[in-house]
Image (cartoon, coloured by chain):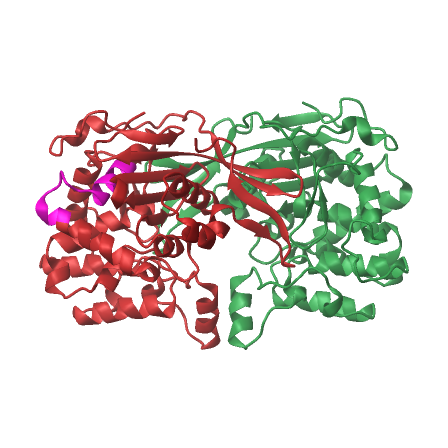
Chain colours: A red, B green
Amino acid sequence: MCPSDSPPERHDPGHEQAVSLLAPADNPVLVEVTRGTMVESRHRGAFAVCDTEGRVLLSAGDVERTIYPRSAIKPLQALALVETGAAESFAVSDAEVALACASHDGEPLHAEAAQHWLQRIGLSVADLECGAHWPYHEPSLRTLAAHGGTPTAAHNNCSGKHSGFLSLAQHLRAPTAGYIRFEHPVQQSVLGILEMMTGLDLRDAPRGIDGCGIPQYGMPLGNLALAFARFAEPNDQPERRQAACARIRRSMAEHPVMVAGHERFCTKVIAATQGRALVKTGAEGVFAAAVPELGLGVAVKIDDGQKRASEVVMAGLLNRLGLLDEGARQVLAPLLEPPLVNRRGETVGVIRLAPEAIT
Amino acid sequence: MCPSDSPPERHDPGHEQAVSLLAPADNPVLVEVTRGTMVESRHRGAFAVCDTEGRVLLSAGDVERTIYPRSAIKPLQALALVETGAAESFAVSDAEVALACASHDGEPLHAEAAQHWLQRIGLSVADLECGAHWPYHEPSLRTLAAHGGTPTAAHNNCSGKHSGFLSLAQHLRAPTAGYIRFEHPVQQSVLGILEMMTGLDLRDAPRGIDGCGIPQYGMPLGNLALAFARFAEPNDQPERRQAACARIRRSMAEHPVMVAGHERFCTKVIAATQGRALVKTGAEGVFAAAVPELGLGVAVKIDDGQKRASEVVMAGLLNRLGLLDEGARQVLAPLLEPPLVNRRGETVGVIRLAPEAIT
């Protein structure tokens, strides 16, 4: 069903909220993992493709089930950085805006970009409150280890988003310490934007803490798709936000490597579609996308939280929406139906859409 | 349902086989992953606890659905090494027998043990056909990288199993090259043992290639539980096999670190229960266990293939079977209900059994 059959009211958004903590209805099997002659594993989930009026054009499963959008929401969190004027006052580049939208791999170019950005605003890696972790990108991890290094918060996949939050805190003349807390002006600014984009009153929504320490708000999957439709075509939003959406879309399209990394799905898809599909992954099997030329938003959630399934569903949906030309389909073939390759380099199975997962 | 309502015939095992390639019935949600105030992800699956007669004493979901046992089957594959006399003729130690049952972490002690074993039988790492991969154990990976090293096949989590296969090939005076192939005497020897232990005719079973290149046979989940019940209490098996089962059980119980690694579930559970529960993990959400004192076998398969869920189900089943005394329950508390800890070190959720998953 549709997350909002009528266009949502921007200033009275509460009517769209549909939180259920009860045991959910069964979502369909969307992805199968084969090995040899049989299906070995299966992934259930739901997806919604919405327009800016909240009409669901394509869906599977329960699109009203409440999910945490996790890092898929980063392009919308970045709106606060841009529309407040913080990005302009600190001369934040398009590459840095893309990094603010990123769950990056911790390659040297990502960590260095975050460090330079922080330095320019008079801060340092010590001000990041996201915690440190080894780079996701294994060659970068090994190079770091080989040089006797240890990871810093700049290697954290969220360091760009947090650099954006710190820039916003400085711009708002708010304390930088504690910028990750729910009640801090930075997070309140983000919350207001998310409410307008999703059409939801999120003050009493289910709430959790993300991997990097910031608040996460539970929302129906369909409303995440709606928010990305508005990000793609924000005609019903204030003018400053329309401009901010355009800048963030352009930044992601022009700097796909900053959004994820050389070996990553998001980077490959944005590059291969030349920005026609602006995709953003999130933890626990979430994926979102904005399709500016169609004015559509896409949201995917795999029940069990596995990325290998959310990626195949997202690739299949982009293909179904006609966004992959012949060249893109060739480049993205390993993402549309990823082979399972064993330690000997043999292809032993495949990850594929279940029959009729996308109709 | 029971994988075999009557005791299976060892020499006419075909009647137990129940292969279905059709879309399966829904398995129940066994595990929930919470974050803040709501459940974020859910894992469906099935489990069976069987006695040596094939009676299912405890189960959830479809125990007749065909699964690949993956690495959970290693202790049974190791039977070929021991019962043929290969282990004796090459003076294979208990620690090496435990390593043959292992999906190990590639810590230095694992890789070195495999190297020494191969050297003793006149072979080397170059004879392993499992392929190489970086150690699963991250500190070992980083140490290896820091010293400019690269992983060899000895670091492969299956290097102990493959060292056992090579010992068996030598003992059988079969060519060592190609010991991973279905038709090689080593794999045929293993196949015959698996048929007797599972009570299945596996010649026409669904077949795939494992991560390390050896054949995998599809079997109903309940038959994996039955095979582990027989491994726990092999009274209906030939004498040499009874002795081999006893030796392998003892080796796993006395060398838990060799079965997995210092930071791993299998090692912690075997150590904390002092071998009362001999647990073995497999890829794609499979887990098996033998409980000698109760003459029971346990098999778990998570539909979506995630280890975090199969571990919580296995821990819950061992608790339910009364195998965890107060001391073990304290040591294993982080495995019974693992906290989700974010990059800042904050506990932000929990992985837990779903209500009524195990009744």
Front residue of B244 and A219: A219
| Position in image of residue A308 (x %, y %) | 48, 46
Q: Quadrant of residue A359?
A: top left
Residue B42 in view, yes or no: yes
Q: Residue A288 location in percent, x, y?
A: 33, 43
When the figure is inspected, residue B157 is found, relative to residue B125, above or below; the finding is above
Q: Residue furthest front?
A: A326
A276 to the left or right of B252: left
B18 or B347: nearer the viewer: B18
User: Residue A197 location, x and y as percent?
Assistant: 19, 40
Image vertical order of residue A313 relative to residue B82, above or below: above
Residue B351 inside the magenta-drawn segment? no
Q: Nearer the viewer, residue B100 or A308?
A: A308
Q: Main secondary structure of the magenta part?
A: helix
Q: Which residues are magenta?
A: A224-242
Locate the N terminus of chain B and report the quarter of the image it occupies. top right
- Image position of B4 with respect to B96: above or below: above
Q: Position of residue B72 (x, y in %)?
A: 67, 45
Horizontally, is A181 left or right of A331 in the view? left
Left/right placement of residue A107 relative to residue B338 reads: left
> B135 above or below B353?
below
Within the image, what quadrant is residue B81 found in?
bottom right
Tell me what residue is drawn at x 85 percent, y 52 percent: B185
The residue under the point 51% across, 69% down is: B142
Image quadrant where one finds the C terminus of chain B: top right
